Image: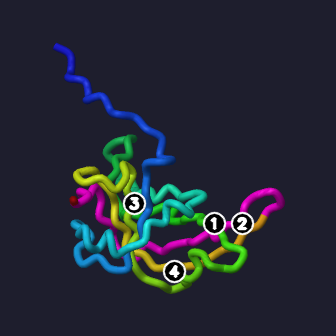
Amino acid sequence: MAATPIAASSRFVPQGVTHYNWLPACANIASPTRTEINNGTDLTPELAEAGDWAINSEAIDTPDYAANFTPQIPGNVTVDGSTLNLYADVASADVRTLLPRGQAGFILKLPGGDVAGRKGDVFPVKVGSQGKPNAIGTPSTINVIFYVTKAPAENITVPA
């Protein structure tokens, strides 16, 4: 008998679906409330590009002399690509006022959108920098780099 296949997914592209919210407060990152989300700021309309915000577990090799195979154990958890590029405003009325260097809060990543019952991740963060790259022929952006200050909460359920 063959193994049961995994359920088919409803595939999508992130543009137009995924949201990134800035939450100034979140009492329990494993379960943000609708009020905390509503009191935050949806950064998505000004978002030009997002880093991966990938939650990774390092692998630690555990070799021994009994075999030539090197087993591994889980190591530290890290977050790669904790950046957001948001459009700049010629009069500086942009993300720079909301997220100055050193500002602490939370990034709520909602891959399936802000829809009750779907999943998301919450990252406790501190703003590290606001890069201002400019290249001829491209819109000006503010590259906000975040430092993830504590372990993120993965696969939280979006509240109603």
Instruction: Work out which residue is located at the far bottom of the displayed protein and give it.
Output: 102
In the image, residue 120 sits, relative to residue 42, either above or below, namely above
In the image, residue 29 sits, relative to residue 13, either above or below, namely below
Mark 3 — residue? 109
Mark 2 — residue? 140
How far apart, in angstroms, are the residues tagged by discs 1 and 3? 18 Å
Query: Would residue 15 appear left or right of 86 to someone viewing this image?
Result: left
Instruction: Find numbered disc 1 in the image and state the secondary structure of the residue it sits on.
Output: strand
In the rendered structure, which amino acid carries the disc numbered 4? Leu
How far apart, in angstroms, are the residues tagged by discs 1 and 2? 6 Å
In the rendered structure, which amino acid carries the disc numbered 3? Lys
Instruction: Find numbered disc 3 in the image and state the secondary structure of the residue it sits on.
Output: strand
Instruction: Find numbered disc 4 in the image and state the secondary structure of the residue it sits on.
Output: helix
Residue appearing at x 23%, y 57% in the figure: 157
**Which one is earlier in the sequence, the residue at label 2 or at label 3?**
3
Q: Dots 1 and 3: beta carbons under 8 Å? A: no
Specify start and end residues of the magenta stretch as a single range: 135-159
Q: Dots 1 and 2: beta carbons under 8 Å? A: yes
Mark 4 — residue? 98
